[in-house]
Amino acid sequence: WSSDVCSSDLLVRNAWDAYGRGDIEGLLAYVDPELTWTYLDPSDPDPQPSVCHGRDQLRVALQRQADQGPGPQVDEIAVHGDRVLVVLHVPGLDRRRAWAAGDRNYLVLTVAGERIAALRACRNRAEARAEAGLTS
């Protein structure tokens, strides 16, 4: 493992640990102020990616998610270059969205320096692995 892989892994773990403790501002401290965030509308059974920018919109979404029940638990983190695949288990998630994914959120983060510069939500593990460059 290179030091970049270790630091990206640790950065992402620290961010999600903060969120797991209910510390949204702690998570956002690891996020670049100019974040590009690509999300999937949970009400659409076949959502197309939509893009938001900046920490403020992410803060609102994270607060809304925190208000809906138990927080996410990290199932998996895999690093490939500047991309980090994160699989989160969110109990009851599939009841709140139009597609089933085993109560999992699949995210690919792009790390630049010491911050998360981009976050992309994916529909499933295969899509996330491809986005992260982890296909074999």
Image: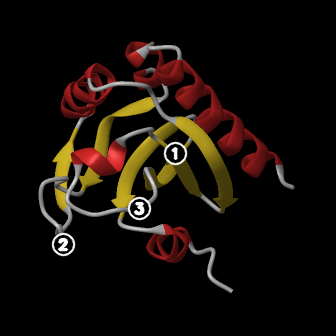
Residue extending furthest toward the right: 1
Counting residues from the start of the chain, the first of labels 2 and 1 encountered is 2
Q: Which residue is mark 1?
A: 88
Residue type, numbered disc 1:
Leu
Dot 2, how many residues are within 10 Å of its Cα: few (below 14), some (14-19), or many (20+)?
A: few
Label 3: element kind: loop
Q: Position of residue 59 (x, y in %)?
A: 26, 25
Task: Answer left or right for 45 relative to 7.
Answer: left
Q: Is residue 130 above or below residue 57?
A: below
| Residue 63 picture quarter | top left
Q: Distance between the Cα atoms at labels 2 and 1?
A: 20 Å
Quadrant where the C terminus is found in the figure: bottom right
Q: Distance between the Cα atoms at labels 3 and 1?
A: 11 Å
Residue type, numbered disc 3:
Ala
Residue type, numbered disc 2:
Asp
Q: Distance between the Cα atoms at labels 3 and 2?
A: 12 Å
